[in-house]
Image: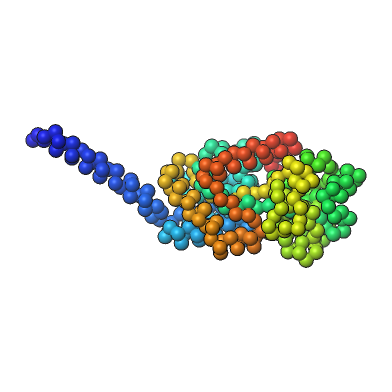
Amino acid sequence: MTFPRRSFLHLAAAAAALGAAPRFATAQAYPTRPVRIISGFPPGGVNDTYARLIGQWLSERLGQQFFVENRPGAGGNLAAEALVRAAPDGYTLLLATSADAWNATLYDNLKFNFVREIAAVAPVVRAPGVLVVHPSLPVKSVPELIASAKANPGKISVASAGIGSAPHMYWELFRTLAGVDMLHVPYRGGGPAVTDLLGGQVQVYFGTTASSIEYIRSGRLRALAVTTATRAAALPEVPALAEFLPTYEASIFVGIVAPRGTPADIVATLSRDINLALGDEKMLRRIAELGDTPLALSSSNFERLIAEETEKWGNVIRSAKLRAE
């Protein structure tokens, strides 16, 4: 049987439209099943809290469950590797943090390249650190701490939550810019470090705002500065370190990423709804309670931020000759 040319063209166009329709419908219907958000941290911590807050928000917005899968270990690398090995279909996401950026240099044997193998979706917050001291240390400002450390090299103890932790990174940047020598005491986690700081066994710590703010308010710890370039809303009376060390800026980003190759329309959907969360009053109150700052960026700007943080902290790590234990 033969068809007139016009009839054939109509049939071909219809067939092409039918072939395209399921793909369009699938993209528009995302998600059609539950989505997992991998977290490289144990349940109950601040990062895990953000994974659950965003998961709940996306569940309500998109009509499917976004559930958190905790996969702690290797400084977050187990979770990151699980993400980059997952299918790029939008059904596996990662709560990424600055740790993923500095791990690229801190670890020698990673089997993946985080910057190249992820699709940035959207950040959620910037989490400032705060430089605190035990009240027994007779310094009340950053210049006084620097002067005391220079007058007593290696005698003031500074705690961290372990090699490669955020408190350690903040300390290394401070040490480099201030030109001071203190005794670094690494702990296995922030909890033990704060416990010994409160007991006076160590004297200085770069903590998270969330873990330190109540101790600051009660007078059990003295805050000398926040680590962001400008003062933090949670502690407006505490100066920024940049007021004394002009190039100092250190904070943790927290955000959502997907495997590289995830369809652009799915990334756009997730990015749109996460940024909408950062305009929600309830979400903003919760972020403020945790002492952090909302960070609304496009996917492309978030990708740029991750690359910049990877380069910045890579330089700090190489300068200090740090390696993960």
Q: Is residue 41 left or right of residue 229?
A: left
For the C terminus, the quadrant is top right
- Seen from the viewer's position, the closer of residues 230 and 84 is 230
Place residue 61 in its image quadrant.
bottom left
Residue at 75 percent of width and 42 percent of height: 246
Specify the quadrant that holds the N terminus.
top left
Q: Residue furthest right?
A: 151
Q: Using the image as rendered, state which of residue 119 and residue 78 is in the foreground.
A: 119
Q: Residue at x 79, y 54 (%)?
A: 224
Q: How many marks?
A: 0
Q: Position of residue 68 (x, y in %)?
A: 52, 57
Position of residue 247 measured from the top left corner of the image (x, y, whole percent): 73, 41
Residue that extends furthest to the left in the rendered view of this protein: 1
**Spot occupied by residue 162 in the image (x, y as percentages of width and height):** 72, 49
- Residue 253 vs residue 163: left or right? left
Residue at 76 percent of width and 53 percent of height: 239
Does residue 266 appear to the left or right of 249 in the view shown? Answer: left
Which of the colour schemes (rainbow, by chain, secondary structure, one colour) is used?
A: rainbow
- What residue lies at 80% left-to-right and 63% top-to-bottom? 220
Front residue of this view, candidates 175 and 295: 295
